[in-house]
Image: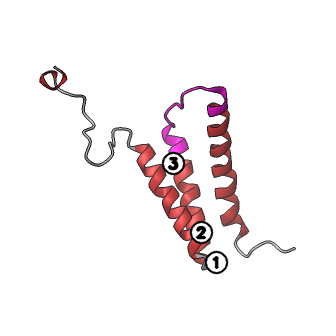
Amino acid sequence: MRLPAFWWLLALPVVIQGAFFVRLCVVRLRGNALQPLSGRMVLLLAASGLAGLAYGVVQSDPLFVVGQACLLIVYYRMRTPGAAPRGESASPPRAEERE
């Protein structure tokens, strides 16, 4: 069995995204709340997403490209902690609204 032509582009997303997934599972199994990611970890996840996106483009794999693009969107949303879903305000309610 031969490795794909650009296997090194695939190795980065597999290792980094796999480590992120394992961290997420371990924290959830322990019942702890997730802590925000550090800037370096978000940068590393974004780099792995871009490497995966490049691999999908080089290999002409539209499914891989779409999957990595969705992950990059998720990483971006994780990076902006105050982002509220559409139609909801990210700010706390005012005093007159609470009464």
User: Range of the magenta residues?
Assistant: 28-42
Spatial CA span between label 2 and label 1: 9 Å
Q: Is residue 14 magenta?
A: no
Question: Which residue is identified by label 2?
Answer: 64
Give the mark, 1 or 3, whose residue is nearer the N terminus.
3
Q: Residues within 10 Å of mark 2 (few under 14, many from 20)?
A: some
Residue at the spot x=24%, y=33% of the render? 91
Q: Residues within 10 Å of mark 1 (few under 14, many from 20)?
A: some
Q: Quadrant of residue 6?
A: bottom right
Most distant residue in the right direction: 1
Is there a contact, CB below 8 Å, between mark 2 and mark 1?
Answer: yes
| Front residue of this view, candidates 77 and 52 | 77
Which label sits on residue 43? 3
Q: Is residue 30 magenta?
A: yes
Mark nearest the camera among 1 and 3 is: 1
Q: Position of residue 39 (x, y in %)?
A: 48, 40
Give the mark, 3 or 2, whose residue is nearer the N terminus.
3
- Which residue type carries mark 1? Gln
Under circle 3, the secondary element is helix
Under circle 1, the secondary element is loop
Which label sits on residue 59? 1
- Which residue type carries mark 2? Phe
Image quarter (top left, top right, bottom left or bottom right) of the C terminus: top left
Q: Quadrant of residue 89?
A: top left
Q: Position of residue 56 (x, y in %)?
A: 60, 72
Spatial CA span between label 3 and label 2: 20 Å
